[in-house]
Amino acid sequence: MQGSIAELMARAAGPGRIEAIFVRPARKEPPVSVQSVEASAAGLTGDHAREGMRAVTLIQAEHLPVIAALAHLDSVTAEDLRRNIVVSGLNLLAFRKHRLQLGDVVLDITGPCPPCSRMETVLGFGGYNAMRGHGGVYAAVEQGGMLSIGDAVTNLPSG
């Protein structure tokens, strides 16, 4: 089954899943793992991020072992990378400028989330480059609600 490039780009083989959720109480403070959290236009309750295009960060669980391999580490955890939501089962970068539904929440994926210079400290020499292209995405909260570990992550049609 074929289609236009736009149709192909809107497809996912199936839904993804929320694997972990973290809030960062303050800048440079350790992330806190939570089972569920409320999302609003201001971001996630308990997280220091600001309202807008970068209110929430997401990363793919599948990228964690890739980052670890590129940084020559045995493993890398989501807490190390300071992203809010870890998802599995779909390619987040494929949904840039798309809307994703996670539980009751609708997020507008606004762009890739590049690594910060702190990744050299967290991951060691070369950590910044190990994360390039694997740092996940930023999102704005279009529709607030509750997010929980295990919730499905699905692409929403444009419009």
Image (tube, grey):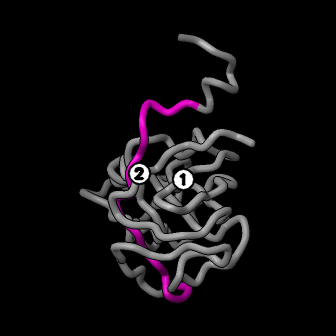
Task: Find residue 152 and name its label.
Answer: 2
x and y percentages locating residue 140 in the rendered image: 67, 64
Q: CA distance from mark 1 to mark 2?
A: 8 Å
Q: Amino acid at mark 1?
A: Gln
The residue positioned 54% from the left and 76% from the top of the image is 44
| Above or below: residue 90 compared with residue 115 | above
Residue range highlighted in magenta: 11-28
x and y percentages locating residue 23 in the rendered image: 46, 78
Residue ranking furthest to the left: 74
The part of the image, by quadrant, that contains residue 87 is bottom left
Circle 1 Cα neighbour tier, 10 Å, few/some/many (<14 / 14–19 / ≥20): some
CB within 8 Å, label 1 to label 2? yes
Q: Is residue 148 magenta?
A: no
Secondary structure found at label 2 = strand
The residue positioned 61% from the left and 32% from the top of the image is 10
The residue positioned 38% from the left and 51% from the top of the image is 17
> Circle 1 is placed at which residue position?
101
| Above or below: residue 98 compared with residue 12 | below
Q: Amino acid at mark 2?
A: Ala
| Above or below: residue 12 compared with residue 101 | above
Question: With 144 as the anchor, is 154 left or right in this view?
Answer: left
